[in-house]
Image (tube, helix red, strand yellow):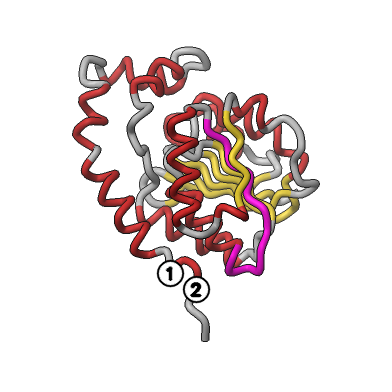
């Protein structure tokens, strides 16, 4: 029995999660002068989020190890071949998704990142993990980069960029989500409009909160 890709990536992922933990102090310091109310406002604003993420351009903003494992399990068990990710940051979530594609026999992952330095870090990490051949990194505003040249059908969508844009990213991709497609939205509590949409009866989705900060949805029609 061959070693799974996610198992072979374990040392790299452990290092990256350790680095993310070590950076938490600097991340907090970058927004220390903002009140909790201001942070929430900026997260949920379609314009002010740029200032907030500009402050955090050196922060990993990584998914949790548990969410990373969830992403791998969902992509692997669903046999995903076409995945889109909004918000790569340093590529930790991307590594989990690409590992699932490799273990599924191949596929294509399109990920977006508007901060150039983060896109470069993600590329380096994906190269180190030996999965860069499965990943296309689109640098720039996702409302533009994810507007065209997409697969006809998408099996899994990860939303983990600017929370205010979750509804608009879904608008761009919705018609390509196959029945049964999985949507994972990290920190979805900071996107109340998105939550209202996917939880609304008759929306075309079945959706539920999963763990403390993830919304897990399935396209049902």
Q: Residues within 10 Å of mark 1 (few under 14, many from 20)?
A: few
Answer whether labels 2 and 1 touch (C-beta < 8 Å): yes
Magenta stretch?
A: 102-113
Q: Is residue 120 magenta?
A: no
Q: Residue 85 shows which numbered tag?
A: none
Residue 106 horizontal/vertical position (percent):
66, 63
Q: Is residue 112 magenta?
A: yes
Q: Which residue is mark 2?
A: 4
Seen at 40% across and 17% down, the residue is 42
Whether residue 181 is visible, yes or no, is no
Q: Which residue is mark 1?
A: 8
Would you say 87 lies left or right of 21 here?
Answer: right
Residue 55 horizontal/vertical position (percent):
34, 21
Seen at 52% across and 81% down, the residue is 2
Q: Observer-nearest residue: 209 or 99?
A: 99
Q: Residues within 10 Å of mark 2 (few under 14, many from 20)?
A: few
Residue 156 against residue 105 in the figure, above or below: above
Q: Observer-nearest residue: 6 or 36?
A: 6
Query: In which quadrant of the rendered view does residue 173 lie?
Result: top right
The answer for how far apart the CA atoms under marks 2 and 1 are is 6 Å
Seen at 58% across and 60% down, the residue is 75
Disc 1, SS: helix
């Amino acid at each position: 029995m061959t070693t799974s890709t996610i198992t072979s990536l374990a040392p790299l992922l452990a290092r990256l999660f350790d680095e993310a933990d070590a950076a938490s102090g600097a991340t907090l310091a970058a927004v220390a002068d903002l009140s909790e109310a201001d942070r929430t406002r900026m997260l949920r604003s379609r314009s002010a989020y740029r200032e907030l993420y500009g402050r955090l351009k050196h922060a990993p903003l990584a998914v949790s190890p548990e969410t990373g494992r969830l992403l791998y399990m969902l992509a692997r068990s669903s046999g995903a071949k076409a995945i889109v990710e909004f918000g790569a940051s340093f590529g930790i979530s991307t590594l989990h998704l690409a590992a699932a594609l490799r273990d599924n026999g191949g596929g294509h992952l399109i990920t977006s990142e508007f901060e150039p330095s983060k896109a470069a870090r993600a590329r380096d990490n994906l190269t180190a993990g030996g999965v860069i051949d499965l990943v296309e990194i689109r640098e720039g505003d996702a409302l533009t980069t994810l507007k065209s040249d997409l697969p006809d059908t998408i099996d899994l969508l990860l939303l983990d960029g600017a929370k205010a844009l979750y509804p608009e990213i879904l608008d761009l991709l919705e018609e390509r989500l196959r029945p049964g497609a999985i949507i994972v939205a990290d920190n979805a509590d900071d996107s109340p409009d998105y939550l209202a949409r996917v939880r609304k009866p008759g929306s075309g989705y079945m959706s539920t909160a999963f763990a403390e900060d993830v919304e897990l949805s399935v396209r049902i029609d």
